[in-house]
Image (cartoon, rainbow, N blue to C red):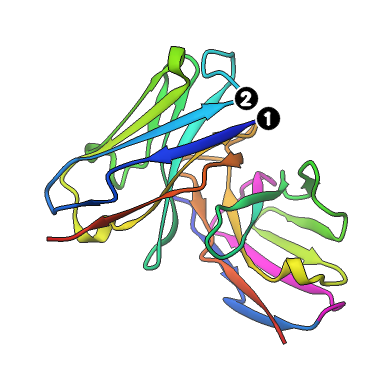
């Protein structure tokens, strides 16, 4: 199985700040990686796929990058609605696996 | 508009079989390339992919639970199903169904989730 190691587990930031979340795959996943946002009591929502492609309707302040085993999600100019949990996901091979999540909180 | 909604028993006892239904609209599981998956989320294990079923009835399971899982579909009624046998307290979780996004195994639309508690 491909293990997805996400960091940090939690992050505190202020409105308007820029933050970066990292995801490390246990083997090369050839950019077949997704990022999801999840708010309390809600289902995950797809933000980014193929490591850097923005899903329909997702604000441009979200961006993804990386290759091989190392990937990151960057959020520019944090807005109130961005404070949530974020997960990466291996989409390359079964079993599909998720990172353990990063909880982004308001400072 | 794509929507999915899960339904299930809410609570069941250890060793019982869980039966979940995913009712969806806005797409058809008889369309070439379509796929629906089941994912669960517990406080202990985070997000865990369980199974996918494809338009052509191909099925893929998480090997860690494979012997306990059965995924199926009813194309005419726009439903997908998941059965998990021999439920344990460790299977307590919110269960989601979701539509596969496209070229790779991502999920672009998710149901609201159904909470399942296993307790004696």
The count of marks equals 2
Structural crowding at the residue carrying mark 1, measured as other residues with C-alpha within 10 Å and reported as few (<14), some (14–19) or many (≥20): few
Magenta segment: does it hold A22?
yes
Q: Which chain carries label 2?
A: B
Quadrant in which residue A66 is drawn:
bottom right
Chain to which mark 1 belongs: B
Let me know if residue A100 is in the magenta part. Answer: no
| The C terminus of chain B: image quadrant | bottom left
Q: Is mark 2 on a helix, strand or loop?
A: loop
Please state if B40 lies on the left or on the right of B65 as rendered. right
Residue located at (64% from left, 54% from top): A36
For the residues labelled 2 and 1, the Cα–Cα distance comes to: 5 Å
Question: Residue A59 got which mark?
Answer: none
The picture places residue A15, in percent across and down from the top left corner, at 82, 79
* Residue B106 spot, x, y in % from top left: 60, 40
Among the two numbered marks 2 and 1 on one chain, the one whose residue lies closer to the N terminus: 1
**Vertical comparison of B111 with B34: above or below:** below
- Residue on which disc 1 sits: B1
Magenta region, residue range: A15-34
**Image position of B41 (left or right of A76):** left
- Check the image and name the residue furthest to the bottom: A107
**Residue at label 2?**
B26
- Which one is nearer the viewer's eye here, A6 or A84? A84
Q: Is residue A8 left or right of residue B64?
A: right
For the residues bearing labels 2 and 1, Cβ distance under 8 angstroms? yes
What residue is drawn where x is 49% and y is 58%? Answer: A3
At horizontal 47% and vertical 36% (from top left) the residue drawn is B37
- Element on which disc 1 rests: loop
Query: Dot 2 surroundings within 10 Å: few (below 14), some, or many (20 or more)?
Result: few
């Amino acid at each position: 199985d491909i293990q997805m190691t996400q960091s940090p587990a939690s992050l505190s930031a202020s409105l308007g700040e820029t933050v970066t979340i990292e995801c490390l795959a246990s083997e090369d996943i050839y950019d077949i990686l997704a990022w999801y946002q999840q708010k309390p009591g809600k289902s995950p929502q797809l933000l980014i796929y193929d490591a850097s492609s923005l899903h329909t309707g997702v604000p441009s302040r979200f961006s993804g990058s990386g290759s091989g085993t190392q990937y990151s999600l960057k959020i520019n100019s944090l807005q109130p609605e961005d404070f949530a949990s974020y997960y990466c996901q291996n989409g390359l091979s079964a079993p599909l696996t998720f990172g353990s999540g990063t909880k982004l909180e308001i400072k | 508009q794509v929507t999915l909604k899960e339904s299930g028993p809410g609570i069941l006892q250890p060793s019982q079989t869980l039966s979940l239904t995913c009712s969806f609209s806005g797409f058809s599981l008889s369309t070439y390339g379509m796929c629906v998956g089941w994912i669960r989320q517990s406080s202990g294990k985070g997000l865990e992919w369980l199974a996918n079923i494809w338009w052509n009835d191909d099925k893929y399971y998480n090997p860690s639970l494979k012997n306990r899982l059965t995924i199926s579909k009813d194309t005419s009624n726009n439903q997908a199903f998941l059965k998990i046998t021999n439920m344990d307290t460790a299977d307590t979780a919110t269960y989601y169904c979701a539509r596969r996004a496209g070229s790779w195994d991502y999920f672009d639309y998710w149901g609201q989730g159904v909470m399942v508690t296993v307790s004696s």
